[in-house]
Image (cartoon, coloured by chain):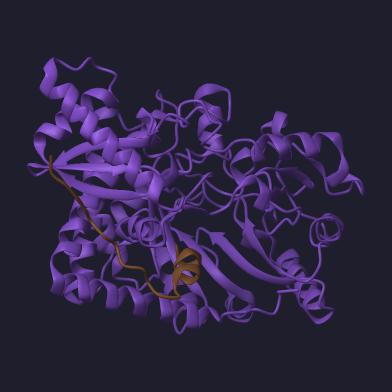
Amino acid sequence: MPERKDFHTFSKDGQAYLFLTQPVSIFKIDDDTARVVRAVELGEPLNGNFERQRWQEAHTFMQRYCGGMPQAKVLRGPEDIDERVAGIYLFTSQKCNLRCAYCYGDEGEYGQRGVMSEQVLNDTFDRLFNDGWDRYFITFFGGEPLMNLPIMDKTAQLAEEYRKERKADISLGIVTNGTMYSRKIKNFFRKHISDATFSLDGPKELNDSQRLSKSGLSVYDRAVKNIRKLTEDASFNWAFRTIVTNRGCEQVEEIYDHLGGFGAGGIGVVNVDVPKDNPLFLDDAQYRRFIEQIVAVNRKGLRSFIEGGQAVAFEYPFYILFYFISRSRALYHCNAGTNLLAVTAEGDVYPCHRFVGAEEFCMGNVSDPGLRQSKRYRALRQRFIDSTVDNRPGCRDCWARYLCGGSCAKYSHAEHGDIDPPVARHCQYIKTIIEELLPEIVGIIERPEEKQVLMRRLGAAVSNRWGSKGMNTDYVS
Amino acid sequence: MEINEIVFESLEGCNEAFEVMT
C-alpha cells in the first residue's frame, strides 16, 4: 500500500503532476485529484464524499500501478559495498599558496601544516590497494597538491608498478588552484593525469575578491594563463570547481557563461559552505536566488541540447533523465567512509576530504598494518554503510529520497552533529531542481519530434563518452 | 479522474554507460 512518503503532487505552469517514488514514475493529473492527493500527502483531513471517493480512486490506482511494476533498481545498496577502497583523496600537501576567504581547510593546512613523505605514500599503497586487480582512483588534493610534486611523481611511479604487476589499475586525478606551472608540471599532467579539476570562481573581479594569493598578485590572471597552457590539446578530462558566495549570487549565469568559454568538460558550481556569521554566507533570499539561477542555466542547457547547440550546463536534466530512463534509485549520497577515503599528509585516514581534521572521524593511520581490521575503522565504516536514505531520519519519509540519496554526511554533521539528518538547504535544492526541471523534460517527451531528438542525442552522448572511456571488462573475474 | 503516465523510453543497452556517465 502506498504510504505518504511514496507519492508527491506538485504543479508547474498550471499543470498538476503526480510523482511515484517507487518505481520512479511521473503522471499528469487533473487539479481535483491533485488537491485531494496533496491533502493526504500533507496529513490533512478530507472533506465530504467527493474528496473521500476521489482519494479512494487515486489510492486504488497507485496500489495497482506500483503492484504491477518491478521495483526500481538500487544503484548501490549495503550488500553491494565490498571491502575495496576504490578511490582516495591523497593529501600530498597540507600547504597552500593561496588564502581563499572561504577555505574550510584553514588555508589548506587543516591544523597540521606539512607535506606527505614517501613512507606515508608507501604505507598508503600497502594498506589500501591490496584488494586485487581492479580499477582505483587517486585524487591529488590539499592544500595545493602541486606544492609537493616529488611525491606526486612517486605516486605515478608506484601506480605504474602496480599496473605492470597487475596488482591495481590506478587512475590519477587532481584538484588544483591552477596557479603553479612549470614544464615539469605540464609533463606530469600529460603523462599521468586522467581527470583534473581547477578551482576558479568566475570573472576576474569576482574571483580575485575571494580567491586571494599570499603574494598579492591576481589569482585569476595566473590561474587562467596556466590553465590554458595545461589544457591545450589536453588528453585528460577537466572541469572547473566554482564556489558562489553572496558576492556572486546574482551572477550565476554570468559565471557559467564566462567559464564556458574555456572549453572545460564541465562546470561544478556550488554555494559557499561557511558558518552563518561569515561575511560570505548566503542568506535565505540569496540562496533562493542562487537555486533559481541554477535552474535557469540548466533549463537553457536542456533547450540547447535539443536544438543542437553547445550546452554550458546540462547536468541536472541529465541526472533526472538517468533516474527515469533507467528506473534507478540511490540509497547514498556518495561512497564516503566505505569505498572512498581520504589520507592526510601524516597518514591519517578519514571518510573523505571534508572530514579531515574532525578527530571523531579519524579511522586510523596507514602506518598501522592492522588499520582495516581495527575496531575503530570497522565501526566508522559500518556507520556509513548503515546511513541509507531508508534509515536516515528526515530522509526515510521524503518523497525525493531515491532521486537524492541524502545530503552530504559532512554537511549533515556540521548542521546537526550527526551524519544522518538531512541539511534543510540540500533538501530545498534537490526538490526545487526536480519540480522545476522535470516538467520541462515531460514537455519534451510529449512532443514526438523533440523526444526523438532528445533520445538520439542522449544515446550518442552516452555512446561517445563510453567509447572514449573504453569499456573495460578486464576486471571481470 | 485523469491520470496519464509520461513514459520514458529505455536507452537500449546503454543503462550501464548512462550510470557511469552520471
Can residue B12 be seen here? The reply is yes
The residue at 77%/34% (across/down) is A379
The residue at 23%/29% (across/down) is A56
Quadrant in which residue A312 is drawn: bottom left
The tally of labels here is 0
Quadrant in which residue A190 is drawn: bottom right
What quarter of the picture does the N terminus of chain A occupy? top left
Front-lying residue, A61 or A387: A61
Quadrant in which residue A449 is drawn: bottom left
The residue at 21%/76% (across/down) is A453
Does residue A37 appear to the left or right of A274 in the view shown? left
Q: Position of residue A395 (x, y in %)?
A: 46, 32
Determine the residue located farthest toward the left in the rendered image.
A14
Q: Colour of chain B?
A: brown
Does residue A247 appear to the left or right of A14 in the view shown? right
Give the chain letter for purple. Answer: A
Q: Position of residue A11 (x, y in %)?
A: 15, 39
Front-lying residue, A337 or A231: A337
Q: Position of residue A79 (x, y in %)?
A: 67, 48
